[in-house]
Amino acid sequence: MKALVLLLEGVDAKKVQTYIQSGNAVFESAEKNRSKLSGEIVAEVREHHGFEPHVLVMTVEGLEEAIDANPFPEAVHDPGKLHLGFLASVPKSPDMKKAGKPQEGQRAFRLIGSVSYLHAPEGVGRSRLAASAEKVLGGPMTDRNWRTACRLRDMASE
């Protein structure tokens, strides 16, 4: 994670904090264009590490809104089974038929704006929907469980 801190400092990020060994980071930046900043981070990774990851830059307000919009409040008591999938923009034509019909007690899925919510009581690893969510939504996303999303919000708010 030290390499991630140095990389972010290379795009003029300030007060960089990382969260576990996950690639999650919280920082301040004078750059307000999140798409441009994301592109700069991808370029830094490519230059220094030879690959191009999908990078999504969010504001603390965006993260707070996603947490506040959680359609499954009953699931927060088991934070590893509630996942938020963050997309760079609202999907233009998600194929919700591919998501299938939720089965009682097995999983629940909702798309609200550019955030998908998956409650998988039996575990995300057993969920075919979790594995195919990008196909359903029509674009790349980054997925975080409830605990991680809340911790990142807390770190960014400090």
Image (cartoon, helix red, strand yellow):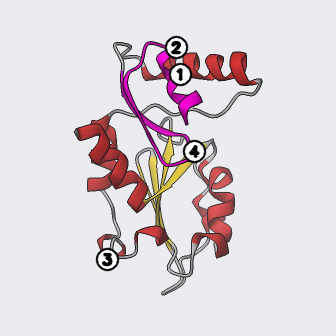
Judged from the image, the secondary structure of the residue bearing numbered disc 4 is strand
Q: Amino acid at mark 2?
A: Gly
User: At 47% across and 40% down in the image, what residue appears?
Assistant: 90
Q: Is residue 48 magenta?
A: no
Q: Amino acid at mark 1?
A: Leu
Q: Are marks 4 and 3 in contact (CB under 8 Å)?
A: no
User: Does label 2 or label 4 sit earlier along the sequence?
Assistant: 2
Q: Amino acid at mark 3?
A: Glu
From the top left corner, tell me how far across and down residue 136 is, in percent: 63, 55
User: Does label 3 or label 1 sit earlier along the sequence?
Assistant: 1
Q: Are marks 4 and 1 in contact (CB under 8 Å)?
A: no
Q: How far apart, in angstroms, are the residues tagged by discs 2 and 3?
A: 41 Å
Q: Write down the residue under mark 4.
A: 141
How many C-alpha atoms fall within 10 Å of the one at disc 3: few (<14), some, or many (≥20)? Answer: few
Quarter in which the C terminus is drawn: top left
Mark number displayed over residue 10:
2
Q: How far apart, in angstroms, are the residues tagged by discs 2 and 4?
A: 24 Å
Q: How far apart, in angstroms, are the residues tagged by discs 1 and 2?
A: 6 Å
Q: Is residue 144 above or below residue 39?
A: below
Mark number displayed over residue 6:
1
Q: Please tell me which residue lies in front, 110 or 50.
A: 50
From the top left corner, tell me how far across and down residue 92 is, in percent: 54, 40
Q: Please tell me which residue lies in front, 24 or 107.
A: 24
**Residue 52 lies in what quarter of the image?**
top right
Q: Which residues are magenta?
A: 1-28
User: At 55% across and 47% down in the image, what residue appears?
Assistant: 22
Q: How far apart, in angstroms, are the residues tagged by discs 3 and 1?
A: 39 Å
Q: Is residue 94 above or below residue 17?
A: below
Q: Are marks 1 and 2 in contact (CB under 8 Å)?
A: yes
Q: Write down the residue under mark 3.
A: 74
Query: Would residue 110 be visible to someone looking at this image?
Result: yes
Q: How far apart, in angstroms, are the residues tagged by discs 4 and 1?
A: 24 Å
